[in-house]
Amino acid sequence: MSRTETWKQKDPWTWRELVLLLVLEFVLVMVVVKYGMQSIYETVFENTLYSGTLTGLTIAGVLLTGLYLAALRPNLRPPISITALCAARCPPTGSV
């Protein structure tokens, strides 16, 4: 089996991760950070160099955190079902 075939079979990323990261980039970063936070940074620093630098650092932090939370972290833990979670915390049905 070639390296490409192995990668295609064992690739843990799905469409879910792709969509989450695209939403993170084009909605959260572009709207919230680029237009919201950058204007706040410009008001605080009164200097476009400093506000642009801090905006870039904020974007890097948001993207790295989003990559970890959306694509890497969930695959490291076994999935927990809602039924198992409720069974561990809720009393059985019928006994009050």
Image (cartoon, rainbow, N blue to C red):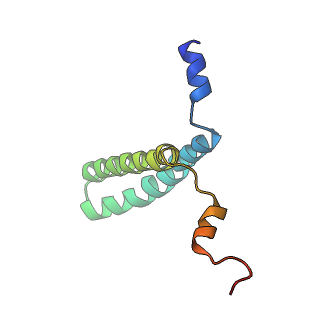
Toward which corner of the image does residue 11 lie, by quadrant? Answer: top right
The N terminus, quarter of image: top right
Left or right of 35: which side holds 88? right
Relative to 94, does residue 47 appear above or below in the rendering?
A: above
Residue shown at 64% from the left, 40% from the top = 15
Residue situated in front as seen by the camera: 2 or 64: 2
The C terminus, quarter of image: bottom right
Relative to 11, does residue 86 appear above or below in the rendering?
A: below
Residue shown at 30% from the left, 52% from the top = 54
Q: Name the residue furthest bottom.
A: 96
Residue situated in front as seen by the camera: 92 or 11: 92
Residue situated in front as seen by the camera: 45 or 17: 17
Q: Name the residue furthest front.
A: 95
Toward which corner of the image does residue 10 lie, by quadrant? Answer: top right
Q: Where in the figure is residue 30, as x and y percent of width and height? A: 49, 50
Residue shown at 31% from the left, 64% from the top = 43
Residue situated in front as seen by the camera: 40 or 12: 12
Residue shown at 54% from the left, 44% from the top = 21
Left or right of 41: which side holds 69? right
> Total label count?
0
Relative to 93, does residue 80 appear above or below in the rendering?
A: above
Q: Where in the figure is residue 90, as x and y percent of width and height? A: 62, 75
Q: Name the residue furthest top.
A: 2
